[in-house]
Image (cartoon, rainbow, N blue to C red):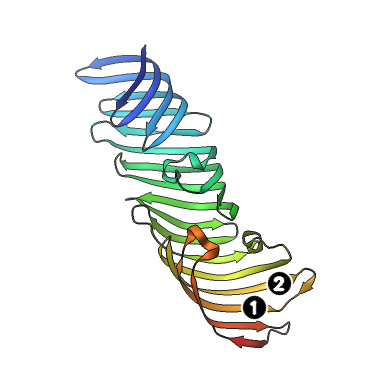
Amino acid sequence: EIKSEAGIINSVGYENLSYNVDLAINNGKNKVNGVGEIGKLLIFGEELNDINTNFRIRDDILYIDNFYNNSLTLNGYYNIRAKSLDIKYNIKNYEIERTSLLKGTDITGFITELSGELSGSIKAPYIKTEILKAEISYGKFQKLKLNGEVEYIDKKIKFENLKVNQNMLNGEYNIDTGEIEGKINIFESEVQKYLGVSDITFRTIGELNFWGNISDLKGTTEITVDNLYYKDKKLPVLYTKLNFNKLNLNNFMESGIFNFNSIKVINSKKKSVVEGTG
């Protein structure tokens, strides 16, 4: 039986570790089987609590047959000598603001379920995640529904066919520099909720391309606004094509310079009745 209040093993910190271990050495080769619990585990800056696990060690390979708590389940292996790993994981019912990458930000949310893989070097891992069901909030953007793939490599987060409500995002964010670029295919019927208005309702369809820094974003967009109602009165369709710069995502509603290349008001017969630029 092994017990330890705290320690560090290969850059992984732990507290309140308790294991029953069988050890055998045959012709210089190690064979270890273990079953136990860990009160707290610190890995990649993340804190995991109340963990149960079964493992095996064969030579320099740690095989994790079962590793779980109330949110996380994983299995795979870790090469002790090479400090590399190959892990499959599943997360359910998790508050994302607990994640170290998001601490200090205004991003909050809840993961109902996601699955993924963790591989490569323990100091520079590759992480791929498939979000099955989650919600995220950021400033005025509350309870956005997420579904799709996210990758992390070389301190960059890549989004692949990530659905935000009914919108589709593809892009990349550099954690160190704050640089971001991407494309959003827009299909959104709740913009008025994020703008804080209630008398007007509408649907937005279009495409947005963006690049730059989170505090100084540039981009181009082409948008059609239809199903437009002011109280109970239906209004014409609006179409606009524009570019923008100096948009600060931390102060979305009070920043940005917008240049309208084209503005059209389209009637019920799909004919443009008003056109302009600005």
Q: At numbered mark 2, what does the secondary structure look like: helix, strand or loop? A: strand
Answer with mark 2 or mark 1, whichever residue precedes in sequence. Answer: 2
Q: Nearer the viewer, residue 256 or 262?
A: 256
Dot 1 surroundings within 10 Å: few (below 14), some, or many (20 or more)?
Answer: many
Marks 2 and 1 sit apart, C-alpha to C-alpha, by 9 Å
Q: Nearer the viewer, residue 88 or 212?
A: 212
User: Which picture quadrant has residue 119?
Assistant: top left
Image coordinates of residue 190 in percent, x first then y, are 65, 61
* Dot 1 amino acid type: Leu
Vertical position of residue 182 compared to residue 31: above or below: below
Q: Kindly tell me whether residue 189 is visible in this rendering.
A: no
Asked whether the residues under the numbered discs 2 and 1 touch, taking CB atoms below 8 Å apart as contact, a structural biologist would say: yes
User: Mark 1 sits on what residue?
Assistant: 238
Residue in the image at 33% along x and 30% along y: 12
Residue in the image at 38% along x and 19% along y: 34
Image coordinates of residue 274 in percent, x first then y, are 65, 87
User: Mark 2 sits on what residue?
Assistant: 228
Q: Kindly tell me whether residue 275 is visible in this rendering.
A: yes
Q: At numbered mark 1, what does the secondary structure look like: helix, strand or loop? A: strand
* Dot 2 amino acid type: Leu
Vertical position of residue 224 compared to residue 38: above or below: below
